[in-house]
């Protein structure tokens, strides 16, 4: 009985030692991994990261530029002749509804930036929404130009887009003028809309960009410090 007990205790000691050795190896491996300097892994041309949707494999800024180009092309291709004095109710409903939807999306993005949500992508969404709002006002001015006595010097869609940008930047050259009361109300609405929503969205976008640049700078500093510590060792 004593020999059996001694053998059992020996086997138990060996198992405990093996388990301690495994734990020691795991700890040493973790220490080695932490000591390895951080390196930026660049994607190889022609290869895509597995397990990620195809949309996020493309750079967001390229998608935003593509959407802005499509918006500009759509502005010149959309059948805006369906809106005007012959359909006033539908024209105003579409105009106000589109502006309200864009304002709601801008407020949503501003809230995500203030709450510092990691899933938010204001650098991609906010510029596109700004372009959409500009095109909505341009389409509204083009529709107003069909009303007699509302707009002076506005004949084409390019004139409407030009007047929208001039009003947005508060330049006011005077070659295109809102002469009617309804057109002036829309101009005042655009000024208030730009002052409230577009200015807040631009501030949120700049805050997000500053945060991203600060994070990248901190990562570069930490990587350089780790490389220096490993070189000293």
Image (cartoon, rainbow, N blue to C red):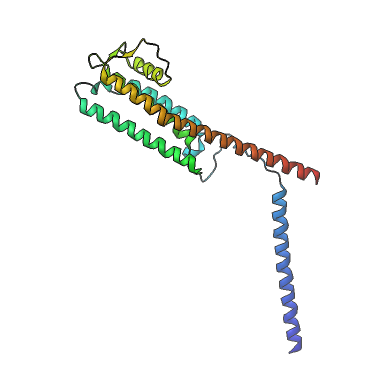
* 90 sits left or right of 175 in the view: left
Say which quarter of the image contains residue 167: top left
Residue in the image at 34% along x and 23% along y: 188
Between 220 and 100, which is closer to the camera in this rendering? 100
Say which quarter of the image contains residue 190: top left
Image spot of residue 114 (x, y percent): 48, 40
**Tally of numbered tags:** 0
Image spot of residue 95 (x, y percent): 29, 28
Residue in the image at 54% along x and 39% along y: 48
Between 100 and 221, which is closer to the camera in this rendering? 100
The relative height of residue 120 versus residue 168 in the rendered view (above or below) is below
Residue in the image at 51% along x and 38% along y: 57
From this viewpoint, which residue is outermost toward the bottom? 1
Image spot of residue 125 (x, y percent): 44, 34
Query: Can residue 59 be seen here?
Result: yes
* 94 sits left or right of 226 in the view: left
Residue in the image at 44% along x and 40% along y: 111
From the image, which quarter does the N terminus lie in?
bottom right
């Amino acid at each position: 009985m004593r020999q059996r007990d001694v053998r059992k205790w020996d086997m138990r000691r060996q198992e405990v030692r093996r388990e301690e050795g495994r734990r020691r190896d795991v700890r040493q491996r973790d220490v080695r991994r932490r000591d390895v300097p951080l390196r930026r892994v660049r994607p190889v041309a022609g290869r895509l990261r597995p397990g990620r949707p195809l949309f996020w494999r493309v750079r967001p800024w390229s998608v935003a530029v593509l959407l802005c180009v499509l918006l500009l092309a759509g502005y010149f291709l959309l059948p805006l002749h369906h809106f005007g004095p012959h359909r006033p109710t539908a024209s105003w409903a579409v105009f106000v509804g589109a502006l309200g939807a864009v304002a709601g999306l801008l407020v949503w993005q501003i809230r995500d930036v203030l709450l510092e949500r990691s899933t938010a992508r204001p650098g991609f969404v906010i510029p596109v929404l700004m372009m959409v709002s500009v095109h909505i006002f341009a389409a509204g001015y083009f529709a107003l130009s069909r009303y007699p006595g509302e707009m002076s010097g506005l004949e084409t869609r390019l004139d409407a887009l030009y007047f929208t940008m001039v009003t947005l930047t508060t330049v006011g050259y005077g070659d295109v003028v809102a002469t009617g009361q309804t057109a002036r109300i829309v101009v005042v609405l655009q000024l208030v809309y730009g002052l409230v929503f577009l200015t807040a969205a631009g501030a949120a976008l700049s805050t997000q960009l500053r945060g991203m640049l600060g994070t990248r700078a901190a990562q570069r500093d930490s990587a350089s410090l780790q490389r220096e510590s490993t070189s000293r060792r």
